Amino acid sequence: MDLFQNPFHILGASTRDNRHRISELAEERSLLFDPNTCMDARSDLTNPRKRLSAEVAWLPGIAPKRAEELMSLLESSPEDLLRLEKLPSISKTNLIATALGRLSDLNTEILADWITVISLGFECIDPEDMRGIINEERIVSGFPEVSDLQSVEFEIQERRKFFCVVIKSALDKMSPKDLVKTITNAVELLTHDGEEQGPILIDDIVDSYEIEAQEFLDKEERNINVIVEKLRAAVDEKRPDTISAPLVSQLIQVVKNWDFVAQPIQVSAKSRGLDHEASHRVARLVRELAVYIFNEHGKLDFSQQLTSMLQEVFAEVGDVAERTSEDGKTLNNIAEQRARLMEEAKDREEKWREEITYVAEIGALFEDKLCISPEGIYWKGHHWNLDSITGVRWGGTRNYANGISTGTVYSIFISDGDFSDFIDTRKEGIFLNFIDRLWKSVGVRLLTEYLEGLRNGKTYRFGSAILSDHGMELERKRLFSSNEKCFCTWSELEISNGPGVFCISKKKDRKFTVSLSYLNEDNIHILEAAITLSRKQGGVMLSNILGD
């Protein structure tokens, strides 16, 4: 009951009135109000057991005149009661609870303050002190003192139920969103964000709220499961990020909606040293997804978004907060490392671009421009993409006239299988500069492609010889019969150079040999580089150069 429903208020009686005065007041009031109500009130106040309920629900410890003033204030300015001090806890809490029932249009912060005052007030009610106050007034009024402490404790628990009903009634007047905000504000205030045990009354409010919110939480949890499965399937099927990104955003929003409603439950559970199992389930589900899409598919950005959201919404769920904090640090470190590697790669690319870019003019009277850059090679109106080039040659030919050297012509040959051409110059500087860049931009790639092909079982023909990963097949020429073939491992072969040629021979029988012209056959410089590197590094296979 609230104060206006209390028998003391109905009869206009005080806790110090004796039986005779209560009967007189009942007779007087029955002339103005409902007689049955007045007689019931008299019965409640004159029966020692029933009287205890009315006493606990009234204003014990407050003088009759002061009680009248407070009831008048309750009717005229109920919002002013929050500022009252130096009142017994039970009396102030009864006043505040009754005032709250008469207020409307409270915003979330104000209602949270009222809930806080009622909860703290109830927490301060002591059964022993209550019995002492009631017995002092019973001595004056002539009623027998209360000896049974349990009966006082029972009535206090009845007030606890009533206060919960009053608070719940005030909350029910709010929109669903404001209701959640109000309970969350109150719980956070009363528990210091879950760090301390809150008053028992706020625990009751949250427990009641959880029962009513359960249907929504269960429904949203099912939605979260559905979105998680859709997102997992999207990344497994290698669908574009334009498909996955909206699913990530949707999942984040649904989890936030779920958490908004679960927030007061989470904070309350934390303050009581309990786990909120549903929060652990949802957080575990999303965390496992974040870990999976990064570990299995490298989706760092999506994983960071989900982990950041988990850190934000589950900050009050201890174990989850710790794990997601560690996840967040790990992912941030990876992101920083990636950014650093990308920056380094960008720097290397810029350096490589500078290193392979070269422009020269070739010709005596009519100069042609020779250009090499990451965009390709340009010569006499033709363009080769670097990745399309399949064959390269280069070398120098010294010319003589009447035994006198007339200089050296340096030649470079480029082919992509569809078009090929020689580039000739007498300027050694141009030749060396261009060959240096041709090797970096094309030669290294061709070398790698040969080695990868050999490792995969391919063979390649160079002149009359056949190259494989384990060695080469060489020929010995015969005059009147077919040439004899012999396969030699790399340990059985030796290499040498002649004028304009690269020679490979069998150590113990040099008739098995092949001489490959640098200017007449493609990629002889590539072959020579591969064999030379292999001999330096060791290994029975040429592809060992690539490592594991």
Image (cartoon, rainbow, N blue to C red):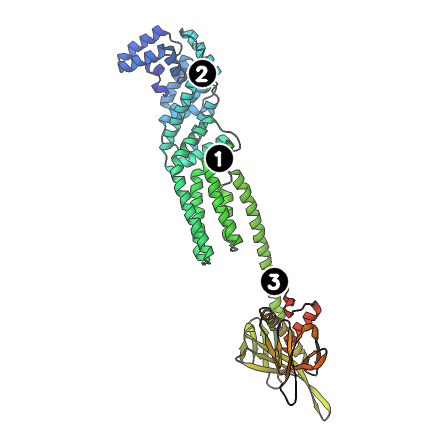
Label 3 neighbour load within 10 Å: few <14, some 14-19, many 20+: few
Q: Name the residue carrying label 2.
A: 150
Label 1 neighbour load within 10 Å: few <14, some 14-19, many 20+: many
Marks 3 and 2 sit apart, C-alpha to C-alpha, by 81 Å
- From where the camera sits, is residue 338 visible? yes
Say what secondary structure mark 1 lies in: helix
Q: Residue at x 71, y 69 (%)?
A: 536
Q: Is residue 390 above or below residue 171?
A: below
Residue 478 horizontal side relative to residue 201, left or right? right
Q: Looking at the picture, how far across and down is residue 410, in whole percent?
A: 65, 82
Quadrant occupied by the N terminus: top left
Q: Name the residue carrying label 1.
A: 267
Marks 1 and 3 sit apart, C-alpha to C-alpha, by 49 Å
- From where the camera sits, is residue 380 visible? no
Say what secondary structure mark 3 lies in: helix
Q: Looking at the picture, how far across and down is residue 175, in whole percent?
A: 36, 37
Q: Looking at the picture, how far across and down is residue 516, in whole percent?
A: 65, 81
Q: Name the residue carrying label 3.
A: 347
Label 2 neighbour load within 10 Å: few <14, some 14-19, many 20+: few
Q: Are marks 1 and 2 in contact (CB under 8 Å)?
A: no
Q: Amino acid at mark 1?
A: Val
**What residue occupies the far front of the structure in this picture?**
481
Q: Is residue 260 above or below residue 358?
A: above
- Earlier along the polypeptide chain: callout 1 or callout 3? 1
Marks 1 and 2 sit apart, C-alpha to C-alpha, by 32 Å
Q: Amino acid at mark 2?
A: Gln
Between label 1 and label 2, give the one nearer the viewer: 2
Q: Nearer the viewer, residue 94 or 294?
A: 294
